[in-house]
Amino acid sequence: MKISPDGRYAIVAVEKGNEIRIYDVTGGAGQISLAAVVSSNALAAYYVNVPNPTNSIEPEAVGISADSSFALVTIQD
């Protein structure tokens, strides 16, 4: 999990859930809301010539750019 440098989002790589969750944390303590979920099916669309990609997608680590404009998530091999 990483918090964006601007403090607006928490990005969570859910390894055993095979998804990436993005939480809006601008509301402060007790006001965290789920902003988006990137499912294994959505991630699988980027795999070409990989049999059953949804079975092997396990998001592992998160990195966020210094200006909070994008995040990178590694996938466990």
Image: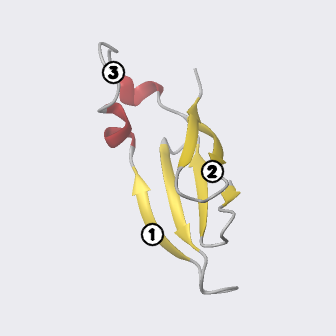
Residue 14 % position (x, y):
57, 47
Residue 46 appears left or right of 70: left
Question: Circles 1 and 2: CB distance less than 8 Å?
Answer: no
Q: In which quadrant of the rendered view does residue 36 lie?
A: bottom left
Specify the amino acid type for callout 1.
Answer: Ala
Colour approach in the figure: secondary structure
Residue 31 % position (x, y):
60, 86
Is residue 51 depicted above or below 38 in this figure? above
Q: Which residue is mark 3?
A: 52
In the image shown, does 31 or 5 lie closer to the viewer? 5
In the structure shown, which secondary structural element does the residue marked by tag 1 occupy? strand
Of circles 1 and 2, the one toward us is 2
What number is the disc on residue 53?
none
What residue do we see at 51% from left, 57% from top?
21
Specify the amino acid type for callout 2.
Answer: Ser
Of circles 3 and 1, the one toward us is 1
What number is the disc on residue 65?
2
Question: Circles 3 and 1: CB distance less than 8 Å?
Answer: no
What residue do we see at 54% from left, 68% from top?
23
Residue 38 % position (x, y):
41, 50
Specify the amino acid type for callout 3.
Answer: Asn
Q: Which residue is mark 1?
A: 35
In the image shown, does 1 or 66 lie closer to the viewer? 66
